[in-house]
Amino acid sequence: MRSKLACVRCSIVIVTSDFLVHATGMSALVINVVAMASTCEKSLRVQSAMAGLVWALNNFLLGAYTAAALSLVSASRTTASAVVLRSKVQVRRTAFLGFVGLTLAVAAMTWDSRSSLLIPVAALLSTYAMFYLRGPSLRWSMLVVSALWMDHAWSHGSWEQIAGNALPGLAAVYGVCRVREAEKPGAANRNFQAARSSVLGS
């Protein structure tokens, strides 16, 4: 009787764990796609930070502790980059170097045989991008970062993380198109006229 109860409890734990893995993966995926498609620099960073927190939990549930730790660092870094977005160069440089050191330290402390060298490379690239790039350049760099993380997602057989790198990559390309369209001469005036027509029409 006790062995049957133990088996039932074990099954419940496994099902619950699988549900949490898929739920956190899907949540992070949606937030990532919305962030990459955004034309607002601050919104992109804030939403990416939120996605980073959820990805950290997802990686922890998968047992990928290096990736989980670096995802937490990534979320903190992205939040910091949003705060210092319009600060002086020296402030951004100090924050950037601080997070580079933190990324390398966390990667070294949590390293195991299952970890990929591409993960810290992706983390360092995204750190530079968040502090120094904007517009299309930022979104293209995020596409490269997604490609680097794909190896980790594939090795853990997580379809949410595979989609979480592929779809935000496509969203980043869409975001580039939106940013370039918004930067065209007369774009602001066309948006104002469209909004005005919509109000008058209603």
Image (spheres, rainbow, N blue to C red):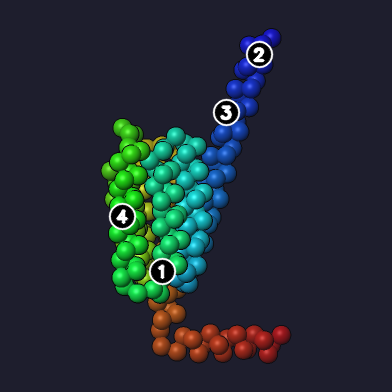
Question: Closer to the N terminus: mark 1 or mark 4?
Answer: 1
- Camera-nearest residue between 14 and 128: 128
- Specify the amino acid type for callout 4: Val
**Residue 86 visible:** yes
Circle 3 SS class: helix
In the drawing, does residue 145 fall left or right of residue 47?
A: left
Residue hosting label 2: 4
Question: Closer to the N terminus: mark 4 or mark 2?
Answer: 2
- Which labelled disc corresponds to residue 100? 4
Residue hosting label 3: 14
**Residue 166 visible:** no
**Which residue is outermost to the top?**
1
**Distance of mark 2 from mark 1, alpha carbons?**
57 Å
**Distance of mark 3 from mark 2, alpha carbons?**
15 Å
Residue hosting label 1: 84
- Specify the amino acid type for callout 1: Val
